[in-house]
Amino acid sequence: MIVEARFEDVEVERLTTTIRFTDPAMFVRLNSNALVGMSAGSSTMTDEDRARLSVLIADDSAEVARNYTDAEGLAFELGANVATARAA
């Protein structure tokens, strides 16, 4: 895509870092609230329905989060591909 846009000296680098949350339960709750809040259907839901859905998502996510939790908390890798190029 970058080359097709006529850029030169294209380089792509993968950057990763470990993200750590000392309180896994809080991360799961915040993440489920964000997911519900960003969903298209949430605008037609009542506050109670949004809260109930958030709890269901958090409960389902808690087991998965435990797989990434150690004595220091929840940890996972976050990565991005970063491309740099020079205009032709």
Image (spheres, helix red, strand yellow):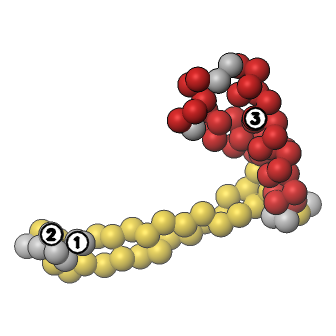
In this orientation, which residue lies closer to the viewer: 47 or 16? 47
Q: Are marks 2 and 1 in contact (CB under 8 Å)?
A: yes
Residue farthest left in this picture: 88
The residue carrying mark 3 is 53
Q: Is residue 13 left or right of residue 63?
A: left
Q: Position of residue 60 (x, y in %)?
A: 83, 50
Q: Can residue 24 be seen at all in this image of the molecule?
A: no
Alpha carbons under labels 1 and 3: distance apart: 41 Å
Residue type marked 2: Ala
Displayed quadrant of residue 78 = bottom right
Q: Are marks 3 and 2 in contact (CB under 8 Å)?
A: no
Which residue is under mark 2? 5
Q: Quadrant of residue 18?
A: bottom right
Instruction: Using the image, determine if residue 79 lies above or below residue 3.
Output: above
Q: Nearer the viewer, mark 1 or mark 3?
A: 3
Q: CA distance from mark 3 to mark 2?
A: 43 Å
Q: Which of the numbered marks, if any, corresponds to residue 68? A: none
SS at circle 3? helix
Residue sitting at the far right: 71
User: In this orientation, which residue lies closer to the viewer: 45 or 59?
Assistant: 45
Please give the residue where the numbered disc 1 appears in the rendered image.
2
The answer for how far apart the CA atoms under marks 2 and 1 are is 5 Å
Instruction: Give the amino acid at mark 3.
Output: Leu
Q: Nearer the viewer, residue 48 or 75?
A: 48
Q: Residues within 10 Å of mark 3 (few under 14, many from 20)?
A: some
Nearer the camera: disc 3 or disc 2: 3
Asked which secondary structure carries label 1, the reply is loop
Q: Up-down: is 41 above or below 70?
A: above
Q: What amino acid type is highlighted by mark number 1?
A: Ile
| Residue at position x 39%, y 68% in the image | 82
